[in-house]
Image (tube, grey):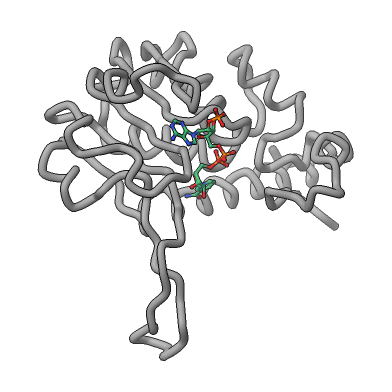
Amino acid sequence: KVAGIIVQQPLPECIPLRAVIDAIDPRKDIDGIHPLNAGLLALGYEGYLPATAHASVELLKRSGIELAGKDAVVVGRSNIVGKPIANMMVQKGPGANSTVTVVHTRTKDLAAHCKRADILIVAAGVPGLVKPEWIKEGACVIDVGVNRVGTKISEKTGKKIAILSGDVDFDAAKEIAGYITPVPGGVGPMTITMLMRNTLNSLKFKLGIA
Ligand code: NAP
């Protein structure tokens, strides 16, 4: 009866993530976290792609951004976001062929890497990490970060809701970047779309109509 399974991370410390991942049927792994799907992605074969990573790359493609030959810098190396984004963009083939650098907390001179990026994808989970002056004029910025930086009262419902911010200062960065995604309303909705797409494909496969 189940077409797709996602694991909401982080798990409580008492539950080992690897054991949970191993328990997922790779054919229902609609967030692409099983080693089989991660391996297929690394090798450039078809499989389920992690939804947020897929969403980030799909936003670039559908905005008509050429990836081939571009210097792409990915801030963050998690298994569900940073690494799969880098794997997708470095593949040999259409809609890829970027020169990819992955940076993280041990990277020397983060600013220097960001400054030379034609495509800058930020998935660190640190509000305001990427300063506007780190962004190359005209660069394409995908801000994956979702950070709760406070609370406010919703005008619609009158209830207390979280104030969300990305990893990039949107208002300042949009004056420099050629393209930039907002938070909220950028990668988030596209992630849901990619999850639904994978779920539909999984169901079609299950029903033998794929
Ligand atoms: P994660 O597992 O915590 O990974 C964060 C990565 O960023 C790590 O590789 C870390 O480096 C790196 N990093 C953290 N601080 C840094 C710094 N100061 N300088 C350089 N690198 C730094 O997080 P995640 O699951 O990949 O998620 C990243 C962000 O995306 C979070 O804000 C999350 O909420 C958001 N997210 C959004 C969606 C969406 O649908 N929009 C979906 C998933 C995640 P180390 O490896 O060295 O620790």
Q: Quadrant of residue 29?
A: top right
Tell me the quarter of the image containing the N terminus: bottom right
Tell me the residue at 76%/25% (across/down): 35
**Residue 80 position within the rendered picture, expressed as x and y whole percent measured from the top left:** 60, 35
Tell me the residue at 37%/14% (across/down): 98
55 w.r.t. 115: above or below? below
Tell me the residue at 80%/44% (across/down): 206
**Residue 100 position within the rendered picture, expressed as x and y whole percent measured from the top left:** 40, 15
Tell me the residue at 68%/42% (across/down): 30
7 w.r.t. 44: above or below? below
User: Relative to 208, is 110 on the left or the right?
Assistant: left
**Residue 192 position within the rendered picture, expressed as x and y whole percent measured from the top left:** 53, 53
**Residue 135 position within the rendered picture, expressed as x and y whole percent measured from the top left:** 21, 31
User: Relative to 45, is 20 on the left or the right?
Assistant: right
Tell me the quarter of the image containing the C terminus: top right
Q: How many marks?
A: 0
**Of 62 and 177, the residue lying toward us:** 177
User: Relative to 95, is 44 on the left or the right?
Assistant: right
Residue at the farthest bottom position:
158
